[in-house]
Image: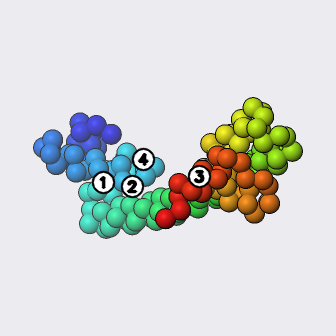
Amino acid sequence: MLQNEFEERTKLSVTAEEYVKIDALYMACGDIDKNEFCKKYMTFEGRLDLMHMIERELNHKHQMYHRLKKEMAEAVEEEELHKLEMADFLLAEAAMLMGGSQTAKRLREKAVELIGEAAVVRMKISHDYDLWQEDKEYILRNMK
């Protein structure tokens, strides 16, 4: 709603600074008709109703935020699980090939891109795959 629309509906004359606050209140109420907002704005009881509308809108947005946050966390967790499964597959394929082959090295590199070198070395150890020179060098670099 524009300032002149507000002034026409309420028969009030407000400054630009006052209207900025009124417009913020209007926007915070959510999906409210301009006429209904102006009518409520004109009375004390109406302004209380507007405050309750804002509170409900805030609660709704708060609930949506938490739901979306939970969904995002679940999606990230699912993606991480998928990366682990894919890396596990790549390392199993590399283990069946000769350790020095270019294909095996590329498979290991892709697994490292997915989950990191530390996780790759851990996974190889846990599956009892042969440790290659790259794995041994990683272990030695990180021993302290």
Q: In the rendered structure, which amino acid carries the disc numbered 3?
A: Tyr
Say if mark 1 contacts mark 2, CB within 8 Å: yes
Q: Mark 1 = which residue?
A: 25
Residue under numbered circle 4:
33
Q: Residue flagged by tag 1: what amino acid is it?
A: Leu
Give the label on residue 29, or none: 2
Give the mark, 4 or 1, whose residue is nearer the N terminus: 1
Relative to 139, 128 lies left or right: right
How far apart are the alpha carbons under marks 4 and 1? 13 Å
Label 2 crowd (10 A; few <14 / some 14-19 / many >=20): many
User: How many other residues sit within 10 Å of disc 1, few (<14), some (14-19) or many (≥20)?
Assistant: some
Quick one: label 3 or label 1, which is nearer the N terminus? 1
Mark on residue 62?
A: none
Q: Amino acid at mark 2?
A: Cys
Position of 81 with respect to 61 (left or right) is right
Residue 129 percent coordinates (x, y):
79, 55
Residue visible at 39% across and 51% down in the picture: 36
Q: Check disc 4 and give the amino acid type.
A: Asp
Residue 33, given in percent of the width and then of the height, sits at 42, 47
| Residues marked 3 and 1 touching at CB (< 8 Å) | no
**Alpha carbons under labels 2 and 4: distance apart:** 10 Å
Q: Secondary structure at mark 1?
A: helix
Residue at image coords 45%, 49%: 31
Give the image location of residue 102, x and y in percent: 75, 32
